[in-house]
Amino acid sequence: MKALVYRGPGILKLEERPDPVVIQPTDAVVRLTTISICGTDLHILKGDVPSISSGRILGHEGVGIVEAVGPEVHDFRPGDRVLISLTTSCGRCSYCRKGMPSHCRSGGWILGNSIDGTQAEFVRIPFADNGLHHLVPEIDDEAAVLLSCNFPTSLECGTMAASVNPGDRVAIVGAGPVGLAALITCRLYSPSEVIMVDLNGHRLQTALTLGATHIVNATGPAAVEAVLALTKGEGVDAAIEAVGIPESFELCQLILAPGGRLANVGVHGKPVSLHLESLWSANLTFTTRLVDASTTARLLRMVRSGQIHPGLLITHRFAFGDILGAYDTFANATREKAGKMVVRVSE
Amino acid sequence: MKALVYRGPGILKLEERPDPVVIQPTDAVVRLTTISICGTDLHILKGDVPSISSGRILGHEGVGIVEAVGPEVHDFRPGDRVLISLTTSCGRCSYCRKGMPSHCRSGGWILGNSIDGTQAEFVRIPFADNGLHHLVPEIDDEAAVLLSCNFPTSLECGTMAASVNPGDRVAIVGAGPVGLAALITCRLYSPSEVIMVDLNGHRLQTALTLGATHIVNATGPAAVEAVLALTKGEGVDAAIEAVGIPESFELCQLILAPGGRLANVGVHGKPVSLHLESLWSANLTFTTRLVDASTTARLLRMVRSGQIHPGLLITHRFAFGDILGAYDTFANATREKAGKMVVRVSE
Amino acid sequence: MKALVYRGPGILKLEERPDPVVIQPTDAVVRLTTISICGTDLHILKGDVPSISSGRILGHEGVGIVEAVGPEVHDFRPGDRVLISLTTSCGRCSYCRKGMPSHCRSGGWILGNSIDGTQAEFVRIPFADNGLHHLVPEIDDEAAVLLSCNFPTSLECGTMAASVNPGDRVAIVGAGPVGLAALITCRLYSPSEVIMVDLNGHRLQTALTLGATHIVNATGPAAVEAVLALTKGEGVDAAIEAVGIPESFELCQLILAPGGRLANVGVHGKPVSLHLESLWSANLTFTTRLVDASTTARLLRMVRSGQIHPGLLITHRFAFGDILGAYDTFANATREKAGKMVVRVSE
Amino acid sequence: MKALVYRGPGILKLEERPDPVVIQPTDAVVRLTTISICGTDLHILKGDVPSISSGRILGHEGVGIVEAVGPEVHDFRPGDRVLISLTTSCGRCSYCRKGMPSHCRSGGWILGNSIDGTQAEFVRIPFADNGLHHLVPEIDDEAAVLLSCNFPTSLECGTMAASVNPGDRVAIVGAGPVGLAALITCRLYSPSEVIMVDLNGHRLQTALTLGATHIVNATGPAAVEAVLALTKGEGVDAAIEAVGIPESFELCQLILAPGGRLANVGVHGKPVSLHLESLWSANLTFTTRLVDASTTARLLRMVRSGQIHPGLLITHRFAFGDILGAYDTFANATREKAGKMVVRVSE
């Protein structure tokens, strides 16, 4: 099969690889129909994720058709149309039993990380009963593929971790696909203000169409000042970091009202400075997390009921043979006015 | 009256000052009988708390007898024996109504900070109905004075912020009075292991007598290694930072199991480095806070029922004329085998 | 002044009474401009609330202008335009300190209950700093008066007590003003389905315009069957009882999925049967409560931001001289197609 | 093998039955060494649990040695010493994924209910990876068997559902093995007062030795009065119903302070009366539940650390051939001064 392979920082190649097969009895092999590229894939490409070694097939987002299953897969059969969750979980280890499958001792985020991923014609999915979701015909591939990682991550690691509540003032730093999905999922809880901060004017315009109440096209002290001005000097109740660089985390710290919550969603490659010399007394809560993907069923229900429209984030569509072009477009988001990149692999 | 006055970093003087009087109708004036010194007072002396200016009477811990009340004080009368809470709150502003009196717009931690404090013969207490607690005779001054700040801070900013639960593994970094009170209040929730970390062997021995299950006399990588060894390499479910320096916060970050909570209690004077490059995916929660003192009534009940014995933390007693000696002893805790310093002001 | 006075079950009279005056230093006297009638007032009239004796001026909903304040009222002055909260709280007793002002030892729900209420030209408001809210000109009387009791009750005792979450299935039994406000406030949390149950077709049509996804015009076993059919036999995640009779509570019990929450909002006059013989194992949570009115400031913010439109519930407007007509219309809601009754008292 | 078989209300027989075998690939067969009798077994015998039909082998508590496993059991092998959890869960259905295995669509409480149970020489355990726990040698059979159902039930459905907190006042109605385990597990959260209510003087004496602060040997209005007198007329913060009859649930309702929580643990055979005519305004929370057994690993850790000693509840030990005698003793608890009955099945 054809697969997109990581060959070290900055280097991706579309290579020929053997088709994956069922290895463990709980495995499924899925033929991919639609995949997408995550901001994390760009972090990987920069070298921010040291667990990924050369030769790895990237990708943890995908929709497809079950091709084969091992004898211990009970809920899926060849031919089933499925959503692949980025979280792999055995369901039996101490972390799974605690309700934290993101840290499953045999799983977690391993797809396109420590095992081969979805940016290929086929992918092997361990513990398939826990990692796949049936798709009804009413949900098309493009809406579904945003539920592999993008929406559960934004909802669980962003909106829910930041405890967004009706009437709250929220700032989201970063208007890429994860930040915009954080905006959409925040709005499920009816904040009074959602301030989007980015340097990409096109993405900020998209944020306005998706319900942001204010936009701030600035960084550093100017951004801090703008957010404080929008909140009468008080700061926000919740801030969501959806970039993954020290500057954006720094910004989030400095715009929180007393009692505020900062939910980090970004994948970071460097330490950040935490201003405890002023924040020790500010009644703040900071969270970091991988996604458990425990909200996937609920998100599917909300797509069906028309409450959310994940496909609105998609700006560019590619054929699989042009996936390197998709990466290039995504990496130059400002120039390309790029939101989410979706790649069609097969029918 | 005599009062202990801050005269800039490193300089304290016992000076003669006019007796305080009722200024606002909600004020009370309290004649102090017993006061104590908080680790925060040492941070102030180091210059870590820039809101404090020269000339300020220090102190936010004290027990005494009401001397005078303004016309809008309803629950206290001259002659009442009272505990002074470090938290001043108007009860009416938006933060008070949200249940966050620590950030009261007219109060919060102001005693011995932006207004004169308790290390004197008399003190003026604003919003006395909210800041004082009646003391029954069964509770002696020495137990009570630990409930001004020390125990509520350890319980609310440490134990409760860290969500300690039965069966948890907990590490407390810093075995001073706040760290030891965190140990005592953690144990109210029955963790299976409480590991105390400090470089002061005497304080660690005290921790063992108060119920610590393990002690680690180390700092830096050696301390990280020791805590991980005690938890089979897994790390702790909750860490409580009770020192206030970058090294101790650094240590706390590195010993958390996935899903862990780090409650910062220490007063910090410098930024710290947060290792998001590895922690972004670790499902951690970090908290900072001032104390609301919302648990004071509950703590008083537990002192009466014999569930906690705050006086166990006291190692040295001084007359008020020797309060500079108390500071000196506290500042040299290792040499002096010092726990909590209590100062007797009057009968 | 003129006032509506309760003279025993079924008997209301519009009488001449002396104007109220400031009695306690924390009192305010408010001249009413707009008031409204609560479903609870109808329960009172039926004799369901034994704490109310003959001679009492009814009413706990109102908007007006401050006429006079006692010397200990700090946040309001004569001439201020204010919203009156139904909850009176001293701010100092153990329940107020616990964040449960609904059970304030000197307050709670006392207006139009154990002290004279708002259905008059003037009303005395105890602890005015805690019981009044400033009104900006952008919020008109009709929106504001719904925030005295109706919306905080529906939000706190209904929606929040039932822990409504995005994607949930919710049933609301009773489509009167409280049930409809529960519908509006539920939708702030984005449930996927909200099923309204009532026997009043007009009110159910209103529910559809306010965002109900399904309506059930039935009672008893037929209503149970209809709700179960709408949820594929599973039942709802949350049920809100907004009537106050045994039949409606019975219905709510029988439509809950395992893990479901039943929030009782209705004022009951009789015991109800709880089917523990089948529900003991069903992982259910039942709640009862008076409103703390702790969400009033947040609701005012959402009215200003245009997120909620309380005035949509108003169907009839009366002059104060015709308040008995307002009661009559409200008591015959089906015949009159009545929602919320608003009464204009003065300019 | 020999097995205890239910033959209709009031009738139990020790019969010869075929040994169970592995049917599903996720099954294990366990040879029992120690079993125990649950209060629920007595409810079954009374006919309170209609899902149980004649011919059923009773019992959901047991410790033993794995005899055989199906090919999809990964964590257990023949010869392993194991604790059997009363909760059977597939780990894949929507309830399991929500963290509510007590309502697993293929499991829940089925052992000794809709499938044959543990009061036999062998038992078949479905989904063995989720339903068994490894036992270390330090934990003896008698401590372990109390963790099949008794302690998780008391902790999850009683103590945790009632949100017991340090300093709380708690009442536990029923001092049988479940009520006493509720006492032990409540104390992990350091309530200031735990009042045990029962009519069995011997059990109440046991409660005192296990840390109850007060006992009430009464029922009905006299019990209400006694509990109120012990709480200065205020009532308790949390009540745990551990009997399962209308009288005990009635009592629990009437002793709650405003804001109180009532956790029902008892298995009920009849509806109860809920006094909404007075409780509608009392800010109460009522809970019912089956146990998820999600705390079993934590309880095992606390047994190992010496924090809890489940074996203290055992008063009588029987050989398996005399299990009918064990039922008889348990059913006549007052006469026999009976606590928990343990039955030794094999070495």
Image (spheres, coloured by chain):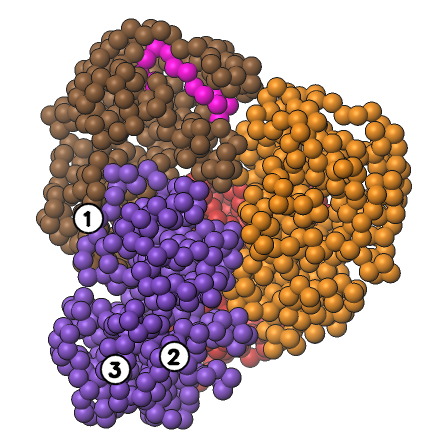
Chain colours: A red, B orange, C brown, D purple
Tell me if residue A113 can be seen: no
Instruction: Give left or right: position of D199 versus A126.
Output: left
Q: Position of residue C338 (x, y in %)?
A: 19, 25
Seen at 86% across and 56% down, the residue is B332
Q: Residues within 10 Å of mark 3 (few under 14, many from 20)?
A: some
Give the residue at x 87% y 60%: B335
Q: Position of residue C313 (x, y in %)?
A: 27, 28
Q: Which residue is mark 2?
A: D145
Q: Residue at x 65, y 67 (%)?
A: B212
Q: Identity of the amino acid at label 2? A: Val
Compared across the picture, whether D282 is left or right of A43 comes to left
Label 1 environment density (alpha carbons within 10 Å; few <14, some 14–19, many ≥20): some
Location of the C terminus of chain D by quadrant is bottom left
| Alpha carbons under labels 1 and 3: distance apart | 38 Å
Front disc: 1 or 3: 3
Q: CA distance from mark 2 to mark 3?
A: 19 Å
Magenta residues, as a range? C117-130
